[in-house]
Image (tube, grey):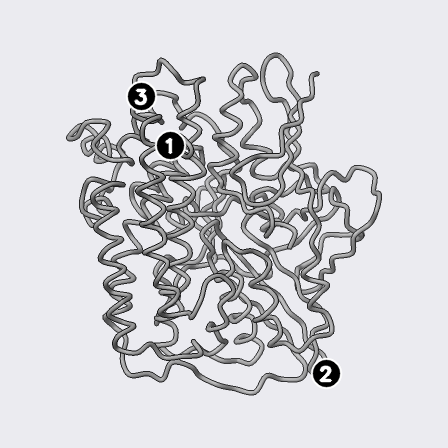
Amino acid sequence: MNRVVVGPFNRVEGDLEVSLDFEDGRVAAAYVNSPLFRGFEQILIGREPTDALTIVPRICGICSVSQSAAAAAALADLAGLRPTPDGQRVSNLILAAENLADHFTHFYLFFMPDFARDAYRGRPWFDAAAARFKATSGSATADALPARAAFLQIMGSLAGKWPHSMTLQPGGVARAPQAAERLRVFAALREFRRWLERHLFGDRLEAVACIESVAGLRRWMAARPATASDFRLFLEIADDLQLARFGRAADRFLSHGAYAREGGWLFPRGVLDLPAGALQPFAPGDVLEDVSHAWLEDDAPRHPAEGDTRPVEYKPGAYTWCKAPRWQGQVVECGALARQAVAGHPLIRELVMDAGGNAANRVIARLLELALVVPAMEDWLRGLGDGPFCAHAESPADGQGCGLVEAARGALGHWLTVRGGRIVRYQIIAPTTWNFSPRDAAGQPGALEQALAGLPEAEPLLVQHVVRSFDPCMVCTVH
């Protein structure tokens, strides 16, 4: 047995360390360490409930809106409050803008530069990948960064600033967008759409969103050369490196439901449990957090509404600060792939039925969401009326609230308990907590730990591809 410690990783938000045990030339076991403890859950204890709206966005500077949305949803649940329809549309626009910016950034700046490494020199696609994606010098950097900045102007118009906006509230948003601001948002969406259709897809968003099968995807690829678009080039690379063979995890996919609207969500809630062969409903009561392998004090798995975060200096068997959340005692994966698998997008459903979650499928689903969500944002903007944009209600002095949203990286949940008008417990499960969890008391490895098992020792870049396929946000992982 040969152990190799990989890390710290570059182009990953926060600190990450992975220990790999190799046997007979392959990864026999992986241990994922989130080495930075931050303590936001303790910071909230004793504060007024609405203080969460100020504090939790600062967990992360990349997905702060997602944290705001979850906190607002938890406070709304505490107060028995429903956002107004226009408030919900603006909230969706703000959350979607951050989520799509994250997808966009991940593809262009975090994931694709690995294929411009000299280790791939000689591959038929290498010259095109290096010219387009090589860090700092590739043409994508010069193209994508201005496009991202222009798209994020939506935040200035609707949320006042980004990150750490205060505009999301339990009943909607703090301020109604004026006519001129709506026009600016629509113009930013149109500009972003044109960029995606010209550079990322080389096709209309609706045409990409309507690819409904693997055979349809192959026909789409055959109709254009590998260099026709960045998505097409990625598919060429993924085929050549057989990325769909690597990074398969538990084959259970969790979604909290994304972008609420009357009667449900744009992308519905549930768990696609392939081992059980069924789409299952998701209930918050089905979640427990295990800390048997974390540097945290506790004696049994607990529901997050009853959990605590008490660090310990030393604990036998512990190797991370990350808890191990489980759904009905099982490991699940979350993210864009899980959202679209649960939602039943026919292409994604066929991909996961054929080969589960893997490095290629996660990226395909993330890019597909760009094609699906930009048109939805245009519809939400067109649907805005004259308000009201925020509902109001008194928060009870005692009670509990649960806020479930979908961040770019997947299922995000906030649970708070209030006594005497003060927070006495606040617990968060972030997407990377699900995906990068350690083993639990039953010895089940987390999703990434499973995804790394079996990778060949002779191809170390595959470890990078699999890790990055989850788009980890480590500063959110242990809050």
Amino acid carrying label 2: it is Gly
Is the residue marked by circle 1 packed among few (<14), some (14-19), or many (20+) residues within 10 Å?
A: few
Q: Nearer the viewer, mark 1 or mark 3?
A: 1
- The residue closer to the viewer here, 332 or 206, is 206
Amino acid carrying label 3: it is Asp
* Quarter of the figure that contains the C terminus: bottom right
Q: Quadrant of residue 388?
A: bottom left
Q: Nearer the viewer, mark 2 or mark 1?
A: 1
* Quarter of the figure that contains the N terminus: top right
- In the orientation shown, which residue stands out farthest toward the left? 223
* Residue linked to disc 3: 127
Amino acid carrying label 1: it is Ser
- The residue closer to the viewer here, 170 or 176, is 176
Q: Residue at x 54, y 74 (%)?
A: 77
Left or right of 331: which side holds 238?
A: left
The image position of residue 21, as x and y in percent, is 66, 22
Q: SS for tag 1?
A: loop
What whole-number distance in Å separates the C-alpha atoms at marks 2 and 1?
A: 57 Å
Q: Are marks 2 and 3 in contact (CB under 8 Å)?
A: no
* Residue linked to disc 1: 137
* Residue linked to disc 2: 420
Q: Are marks 1 and 3 in contact (CB under 8 Å)?
A: no
What whole-number distance in Å separates the C-alpha atoms at marks 2 and 3?
A: 64 Å
